[in-house]
Amino acid sequence: MGIFRTVVLLALITCLGCGAASAEKRIALIIGNSAYKNVPRLQNPVNDAVLMAEMLNKAGFDVTTRLNLNANDMRRSLREFGASARSADVVVIYYAGHGIEMDGNNYLIPTDAVLETDADVLDETVPVDRLLFAAEPARQLRLIILDACRDNPFAKTMKRTIAVRAVGGGLAKIEPSSPNTMIAFAAKAGSTASDGDGKNGPFAIALAEYLPKPGLDLRKAFGFVRDEVLRNTDYRQEPYVYGSLGGEDVPLVPAKPVVGTQSNPDDAIRRDYELALQLGTRDGWNAFLARYPGGFYTDLAKGQLNKIAAEEARSKAEAGEQARAAPEKADADIKASDQAAAEKAANDLAAKQGPTAAEKKKEEPQKVASLPPPSDTAVAHSGVDLVKSVQSELRRVGCLTEASDGDWNAASQRSLTLFNRYAGTRFDAKVANADVLDAIKSKSSRVCPLVCDHGYRADGEHCTRITCRAGYRVNDSNECEKVLEKRPVASHERAAPRVDAERKRNELAPARPQASGQYICNNQTGCRPVRPGCKIGSWSRAGNPALGGLYESCK
């Protein structure tokens, strides 16, 4: 009979769990675009979409999968999915394929897009805001996953209608306005993601591993995804999450109910025993014994009754003793009063007669051996050890970077101020005492956050250098931003000196002789006949052919 009751109980628990899960409507839309018509085909988006669809289907989602969609099909799929989301509790939209960022806005690219100019982006793509609009009616959770941060060939060939318009690879960061909404990028804003060398990309593989874990909060799950992708891409690709959730854990897959555990039959008895113990009266213990006439807790209850009886007997004995001692105490009080009156009268008489010799001797100061004062060195040594201990504990919880030298200086006081801020305490930063030491020792892990220099980011307990891809640099906010190319400006001022120098050389050069028939002419001497037996030759100055002329060569 007991086995039958246990089986029935397990069946009821299982059915109740199934009813709770089925009462929650969970839907997902999966889009994967690989077969692009006007740029090279992508290998992994369709494979990643199939992987995500299988994972969400096993997690209890009603999954709609769409592959290689043109612009009209993408818009139609989002419109139909948005209608289903009006009655859903949890909505997930996953997109894998090409995406583009223009003027700070993100767009998803269908397979039939041409994008000859930047103006075509508004007509041939689907804005990411359209995905948020489709998921917005969900009652509990909206999750948008964009695996669209690949290096985009459209941005390289696209003509710009306005020269200053920014069209870049990757996606721009986005902050959702609706509550309980999360947007996950395969790579941080402004950077690109890798397709990987296998059948699936590293981002999709990590998602399929951590998102379906029962009871795992989404924020922690995406933290594990980030760490996994960083390791598998040699820290070149860092996934990023935008949006926020509430204070409670929000798992994508609820935790499985614990089935098959049997309650301890003594639990109810123990709870009743604790209630009787809190009451602590004879009536309470008698009621407990009436309900539980035998067992371990029954023996404990009888012991409590014996304890109460002993207390009552002791109280009665003390009351009787006080009653018997009352007359004696009254007589003693009367005797003490008479003796005090006699002493007062004697003192008054002695005061009138003056002090006696014995009293004068008592009034003389007596020499008392004095003890040496405590050693200041010992006190100082104890204080230094306490300060060193406090400094060591502040270093352990990450609030102090200086050495533990026993000097409670300005740096140590700043570190205690940081500890107060992050631990919620209110110690005086100017004093290092035992209470401060006990409070810091109670912390088992880091309290103050790790602060890294510019160009580095905190990674666990270490600072890791930020590496930007080609054409990007780390800005003042410690993020990668694109480096704008500076076009050279033609300068007309430098040509003038060369022209003036050339003209000056020509003015200072001697006039070049000219030959005309049998005459040789010169601007300075005029023309004369060529002498018999002579020939006309030409000459030039080395390094400057412009300076030269004709000469007469005679044998």
Image: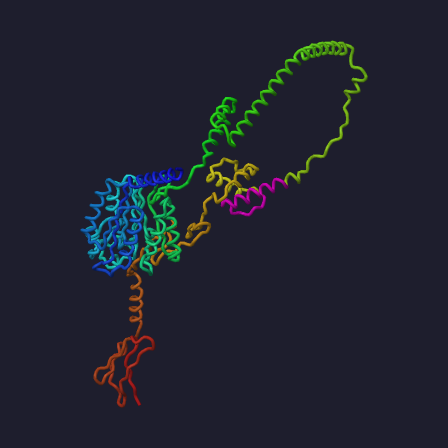
The image shows residue 539 at horizontal and vertical percentages of 30, 81
Looking at the image, which residue is at 39% across and 37% down?
A: 1
Q: Residue furthest front?
A: 1
The image shows residue 101 at horizontal and vertical percentages of 27, 52
Residues 145 and 429: in front is 145
**Quadrant location of the C terminus in the rendered image:** bottom left
Which residues are drawn in magenta?
Answer: 381-406
Residues 313 and 36: in front is 313
In the picture, measured across the screen, residue 78 lies left or right of residue 225, that is: left
Residue 414 visible in the current orientation: no
Residue 261 visible in the current orientation: yes
In reply to whether residue 387 is colored magenta, the answer given is yes
Q: Magenta residues: mostly which secondary structure?
A: helix
The image shows a total of numbered marks equal to 0
Looking at the image, which residue is at 52% across and 43% down?
A: 394
| Residue 429 against residue 44 in the figure, above or below | above
The image shows residue 494 at horizontal and vertical percentages of 31, 62
| Residue 273 against residue 141 in the figure, above or below | above
